[in-house]
Image (cartoon, coloured by chain):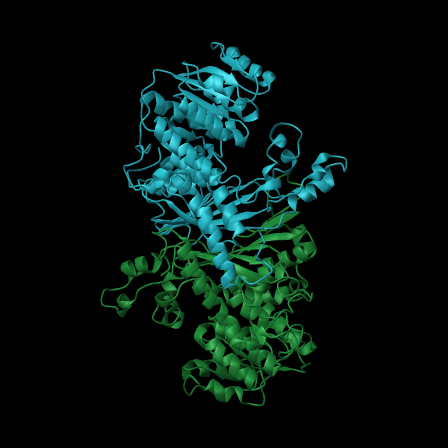
Chain colours: A green, B cyan
Amino acid sequence: MRHRFSNAPLSRRDLIKAAGAAGVALASAPEQSPAANQAIGSHPATMLRVPFERHAKVRLAIVGTGLRGTSMLAEWLAVDGVEITAVADVIPAKAARAARLVTDAGRPAPAVYSSGERDFERLVSRDDIDIVYTATPWDWHVPICLAAMRAGKHAATEVPAATTVEDCWELVNTSEATRKHCLMMENCCYDFNEMLVDTMVKAGEFGEILYAEAAYIHDLRSILFEDRDEGLWRRTPHTNRDGNFYPTHGLGPVAWYLDIHRRDRFDYLVSMSTPERGLSDWRASHVPQSSPKWQEKYAAGDINTSLIKTILGKTILLQHNVTLPTPYDRLNSVRGTRGAFKDYPARVYREGHPGGHRWSPIDETLKAQFTHPLWQRVGEIARAKGGHGGMDFIMAYRLIETMLQGTSPDFDVYDAAAWSVPWPLSEASLALSSSPVRFPDFTRGEWNGALTSP
Amino acid sequence: MRHRFSNAPLSRRDLIKAAGAAGVALASAPEQSPAANQAIGSHPATMLRVPFERHAKVRLAIVGTGLRGTSMLAEWLAVDGVEITAVADVIPAKAARAARLVTDAGRPAPAVYSSGERDFERLVSRDDIDIVYTATPWDWHVPICLAAMRAGKHAATEVPAATTVEDCWELVNTSEATRKHCLMMENCCYDFNEMLVDTMVKAGEFGEILYAEAAYIHDLRSILFEDRDEGLWRRTPHTNRDGNFYPTHGLGPVAWYLDIHRRDRFDYLVSMSTPERGLSDWRASHVPQSSPKWQEKYAAGDINTSLIKTILGKTILLQHNVTLPTPYDRLNSVRGTRGAFKDYPARVYREGHPGGHRWSPIDETLKAQFTHPLWQRVGEIARAKGGHGGMDFIMAYRLIETMLQGTSPDFDVYDAAAWSVPWPLSEASLALSSSPVRFPDFTRGEWNGALTSP
């Protein structure tokens, strides 16, 4: 359906048809959330700017102890004030390995749950858990976060938090109703360059930001075809969906640069995908004809490009490409009234600074001036830990810091929803030959309340 | 009107309204060209792949001898087989200066036309002109090209060829009716990197190209405010239009990479602009309050970003930004099934080549293998002449070569129209909150024929 109109005119009828379908697509969000259609105030109070209760220590449970869960476990163990009280995985050996990593670190043994894929329901019912961190395959993020919040625990999930508009609303409604936070652990928000850029942006070094670029460009073809770990589930959406599956690594930091849900909001997007070649070509050259993988059809275009308009009129270029041979890139760029930043490689331009009309590298002077306070404080430990160059530790450290201090988290359920929803919204736009599709206002009109990133 | 919906839902009604308006906008193209609505064959024969008649020498006239016309005059004089038989400019001193440059080069004095802004009509009526090259302000490109073709001369124009859908059709209809070529002199098609990339693309080095980026990112603020040359006219569209004013420098080369009008065609586009800040800020800090420039309002967003879909489903990112402080960039990138190229700085990635998942620079080995034959033959002279790094000479040399040899030109009136029309089409999309807007098929269905760039 993606190229439905591409060989015929976008006639008035086509666009009206599209409009009709869009009407449905766009309506579906509010449908999921009757409150969204009511006057501000008649729904549960917002979770924007709601502080954590103070914790003497943070009791954390992990659901999903595969590659990511195990990697993050090492980061959690390195942060003071964390106790791992429970771990769960559908594969008993993986849950046991995680428990062993905890005891090997000289900590009390966590409870272990691995009796089937819904055993997390027993885990969340414990009374010694403050927050449940989920590192499962994408489809499990929502049920586990909902179960955790309904059991009175805060929820933290890997990215994306949800893959449908309805599930994004379900997370928002549940966080508001239970007064528990639902945080999407977007580690790229905490990477060195992203935090440096955010610091420069907030310092006004680039003037008013008018445009930003966010992407996940990462050649995952071999991983997607492996018969273990991500290969077991991450190829599936390529067979039955299209759009931007993985918007948050690029969009999270950009949302901080643009003060999204502080003084601006995503308004609408348009999206375009290329044809699919990458997985088909890879299969042809790497997968034996006997493999059941030859029964698959790949529905997702190799490169999905979306343009997001914000309420203040800013433009965000958002791209996803995991199935072609090209170097890793999150784009991570901003352009403003006084300068610009581009990443991969990182370079900066500021009007009136030496160097003429050329980019300058991120040199020591710039680092001395704009390294984010978090990286100044714990950057050395972070780099030593090394999870994704240190950003994983900074993210873990910062979450625990806010919970110990009883301050509000750096991001909330509204960010989790708005940063994740470009997948279904881009999919809807593609089905309508790139027609504009509206973002739901997950904050119910309360997005314009200041307060900035850490 | 640009942000008409941006503070209200894109309701079903909005989109239907948009569809209605788009219906009109899209219909306007065919309206201008009744032939386009008739069956293939019932209109004048195509100008696709039509060779020039052989010329013993090429008698060339120049209309507009300001900065660009004078700069190109030096290139024309450096090409063997060219005689400059006439020059015209509304400013007598500029026409006279051009004539003097010709005689100073030891060539016969050209006829000089400078009796008012329509004196080009007398120029085109001469019988010693083969082709009329126009380097006037944008609004004069169409009337001069039409006059030249109707007087039996080939037309060559600076970019953009036209700024409305109607004028694009008028150029096509007139070229077909008069059997004279109308060429848009897109010099960036002939730049070293662009021709190297085109050579690599045609050699299959990147596999099938699925995505390309094209842009004109050039800080023109000081030039736009000058009280001479471009400053006298180039600021005007910023006061009464929006969209991508200058798509061709980026899109021309990309059209060659993607074999547009050879085996593919632009299908539709969506467009998004940021708010305007650049010219307002510049005026505030550089223009005295007494200046009449303070009566101007700036309607064009600083950054316009469009996505173009081709009939084969490829995606092109097309951007325009001339009013913010940022280094020069045409993006000039391609991504395919076997590799990718990015420019600014130029770098290449090809699967299986040494260097792992990293970009490699354009080294001597690559240059030895993929430098375009034109640059191999006359690159040294081109660099010595130096107009825009040599591409101006290569472009001039190549046009004269095709006219002397009697082969078909590298681009034609269909390219001139399709590479220029993103301005009005992006403007239409912006007015419809980024709704998709259809490209007219200027080739009337004959785009899927033979092949290739020089």
Residue B191 point in image, percent of width and height: 45, 34
Looking at the image, which is closer to me, B275 or A158?
B275
Looking at the image, which is closer to me, B338 or A380?
B338
Residue B338 point in image, percent of width and height: 35, 51
Q: Is residue A422 left or right of residue A261?
A: left
Q: Is residue A387 left or right of residue B224?
A: left
Q: Could you tell me if residue B371 is visible in this image?
A: no
* B59 in relation to A227, above or below: above
Looking at the image, which is closer to me, A210 or B393?
A210
Task: Identify which residue is drawn at 40% across, 63% down.
Answer: A242
Q: How many marks?
A: 0
Task: Identify which residue is drawn at 35% across, 31% down.
Answer: B176
Q: Could you tell me if residue A176 is visible in this image?
A: yes
Quarter of the C terminus of chain B within the rendering:
top left
Residue B375 point in image, percent of width and height: 40, 30
Q: Is residue A4 left or right of residue A77?
A: left
Q: Quadrant of residue A132?
A: bottom right
Looking at the image, which is closer to me, B214 or A169?
A169
Task: Identify which residue is drawn at 54% across, 70% down.
Answer: A417
Residue A29 point in image, percent of width and height: 51, 71
